[in-house]
Image (tube, helix red, strand yellow):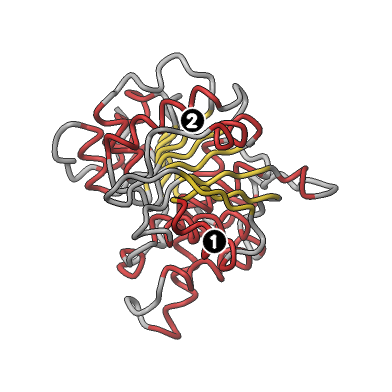
Amino acid sequence: MPNRSDEQVITPRLLREWPLPDPQGDKESRGTVLVVGGSRFTPGGVLLAGVAALRAGAGRLQLAVTGSTATALSIAVPEAKVVGLPETDRGSVSGDVPGHLLELAAEADVLAIGPGLDDVEETGRLLHRLLDAAGKEAAVVLDAYALGALSQERDLLSGRSQRVVLTPNVVEAGHLLGRDPRDDLAAEAAELAHRYECTVSLYGHIAAPDGRAWREESGDAGLGTSGSGDVRAGIVAGLLGRGADPAQSACWGAFAHAVSGQRLAPRYGRTGFLARELVDEVAYTIATV
């Protein structure tokens, strides 16, 4: 199992030698990203992930949240198509997926599922329906409660052709592993990549199912701010939308996320910046590698 010494360090030089696709033409060439999440009380997670996807280069953005928050979100993100979803009495997104969402899922190039969801059972039902509807060539980013749903049904991804990236934090990694993570997060990321047969981005450690591994060393304590994980998931989704493969998207995404925080530190200190401010640094960080 790979450990820290087996990882390539992600540097600007490594990324310059692994350039992102540079799609030509209109917004269609940079992919459609569909972000699904956002309970009645946490629609901001979808906003952060969606705008981060656009900043990372996605061409079109679609957001799906609870019906009670859809109008407000459509005003907050005028660049996106926003659709409302059924919600439970407690304000969670219902697993009873409407037909219009399945139609969007079937046409999307990338699905980012999880930001702002808050009911693991409803999320599990939602995840089944979305993965069944998604195109065979689509890419999928699973974050937050979608990872919780995956941890409860570990063969959920088995036999599916979609390219999947998992973006857990350390707590979510523990759920996926079924135990507390050990200190060697490189090995833990590699175990998850092997177990779920997908790319994993875990706290600066990226592992591909073929055994390749990377490490991002620019991250600092400020990235622990609320909503930061939604931003990271959105960056990865946007890079997938513009044509990067899962491992490249995870590596560039980890770098863009961490270095965006570095750029904010002189203004706000190491721990004073907000996730929404990270989003505004993403495009410049990627462009100046």
Q: Residues within 10 Å of mark 2 (few under 14, many from 20)?
A: many
From this view, report whether residue 170 is shown above or below residue 75: above
- Mark 1: which amino acid? Thr
Q: Is residue 60 left or right of residue 197?
A: right
From this view, report whether residue 212 is shown above or below residue 93: above
In the rendering, at what x and y percent does residue 288 appear? 65, 65
Classify the position of the N terminus by image quarter.
Answer: top left
- Work out which residue is located at the far left of the displayed protein and give it: 180
Alpha-carbon span between mark 2 and mark 1: 23 Å
Classify the position of the C terminus by image quarter.
Answer: bottom right
- Work out which residue is located at the far top of the displayed protein and give it: 159
For numbered disc 2, what is the local secondary structure?
A: helix
Q: Earlier in the sequence, mark 2 or mark 1?
A: 1
In the rendering, at what x and y percent does residue 232 appear? 45, 54
Q: In which image quadrant can residue 166 be found?
A: top left
Q: Identify the mark at residue 130; answer none if there is no mark.
A: 2
Q: Identify the mark at residue 71; answer none if there is no mark.
A: 1
- Work out which residue is located at the far bottom of the displayed protein and give it: 267
Q: Residue at x 56, y 27 (%)?
A: 134
Q: Residue at x 29, y 29 (%)?
A: 191
Q: Nearer the viewer, residue 41 or 161?
A: 41
- Work out which residue is located at the far right of the displayed protein and give it: 25
In the rendering, at what x and y percent does residue 197 appear? 41, 23
For numbered disc 1, what is the local secondary structure?
A: helix
Q: Nearer the viewer, residue 172 or 289?
A: 172
